[in-house]
Image: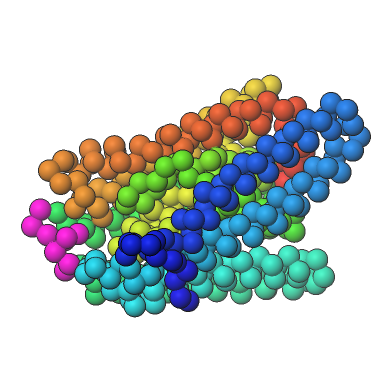
Amino acid sequence: MADISVLLEGSTAPVYAADTIEPMAIWVTIGVVIGLALVAVIFLLFDREDFGKFAKIALIGSVIYAAAFGILMLVLEITKHFSLVYADENYINHADLISHVLVPLAIACAIVLVSAILLCIIYKFKRKAFKIVGWICGVLILASFVVASILIGMYYAANISHDGYYNSDTASVSNLGLYISMGALIVLLAIFAIFLGKGGKKGFDTKTIAYGAICIALSFALSYIKIFQLPQGGSVTLVSLLPLMVYSYMFGIRKGIFAGIIYGLLQAVQDPFIIHPAQFLLDYPIAFAFIGLAGIFASIKAMDKVPQVKFALGAIVACSFRFVTHVLSGVFAFAAYAGEMNALVYSLSYNSFVFVDMLITIVAGVLVFSSKNFVKLVSQYYKSTRA
């Protein structure tokens, strides 16, 4: 796809459509959110009977808006990131970057999306075939992840392993450290899912998939509203993780982890900074899978009177593990950026943006969980998944 850009008069620097549209879209989104909030307040004060109808319409509209905004920005970001404007960076082979990184990740995301839609349809109209179709979709999704990892590994071997920057006399990518970190964190996620995710319904019904798709779409759209962005990947956003955390709180950490993996893949396509297959897994699907731990305290009855505290503690746990994941990636993959600084110190300081993102999300989450109506709604869904 040709890059959508224009040249400023008297300048050779390209101006990308993504950079032009994003700030306008941010302000439009903020205006929409404020408008919906004001209307909601008016309904609550003067017409509570129709508030439910308004909430449903607002939810449907928000999902459509989030999906449209997310798709638009995804396309524009892809054209920006993979433009020939980066040809001056000699250590990047753009053809390999597209064929070995972007395309397999995009295919993996497409398979996940199509599988979710197909399973919803099968569950609704031909439930007997749901199990076998689910297994087929699961195998395809797993295969797409494996193929993506292999191709990213080939890209690393061909373009980065001997580039003289990431691997030089002063710094190098630690394959052993990356693979050990990746394996240990995958095992840790499995332990959390097996032992702390007990009590929930097995499998994904229509409601679970639908709400998961809604929360992922909202998080993905909000991830474009960036307060600031770091040069080697990572950004502080406007509560982009809140919908994922609420989903984990409502449907349990097993489903929350799964939603986090899908969101991590979307982040890899949206804003890729990938030099190694294990680093890709650490910084994207594994890091965001830990966001699924946000609902870890949802079942503690002793804290039912303070749902804000349950949410805040869950968010701290989730983001702390995300931070550890990014730090390990920084130490073993990006030591070249540390310069004379110790790689661990550099990675700890660079990835501290996670806690800024966490604080913003906690503030918003505490405000949301202070609403009795919202807590009641969330509790109903939580109990229904335990029925």
Question: With 360 as the anchor, is 12 left or right in this view?
Answer: left
Q: Can residue 157 be seen by looking at this rendering?
A: no
| Image location of residue 124, percent across then percent down | 80, 66
| Image location of residue 223, percent across then percent down | 52, 49
Q: Nearer the viewer, residue 6 or 336?
A: 6
Identify the residue at horizontal 75%, vertical 59% (top origin).
206
The answer to whether residue 27 is magenta is no
Question: Residue furthest toward the front?
Answer: 10
Tally the numbered discs: 0
| Image location of residue 226, percent across then percent down | 48, 45
Image position of 59 with respect to 131: above or below: above
Identify the residue at horizontal 44%, vertical 62% (top origin).
16
Q: Quadrant of residue 150?
A: bottom left
Question: Residue furthest toward the left?
Answer: 169
Question: With 1 as the anchor, is 96 left or right in this view?
Answer: left
Identify the residue at horizontal 49%, vertical 61% (top origin).
17
Tell me which colouring the rendered structure shows. rainbow
Image position of 162 with respect to 220: above or below: below
Q: Which residues are magenta?
A: 162-170
Q: Nearer the viewer, residue 270 or 187?
A: 270
Q: Can residue 365 be seen by looking at this rendering?
A: yes
Q: Nearer the viewer, residue 8 or 364?
A: 8
Identify the residue at horizontal 48%, vertical 31% (top origin).
359
Q: What predominant SS class does the magenta segment belong to? A: loop
Question: With 264 as the anchor, is 329 left or right in this view?
Answer: left
The answer to whether residue 164 is magenta is yes
Image position of 135 with respect to 21: above or below: below
Question: With 208 as the anchor, is 17 left or right in this view?
Answer: left
- Quarter of the image with the C terminus in it: top right
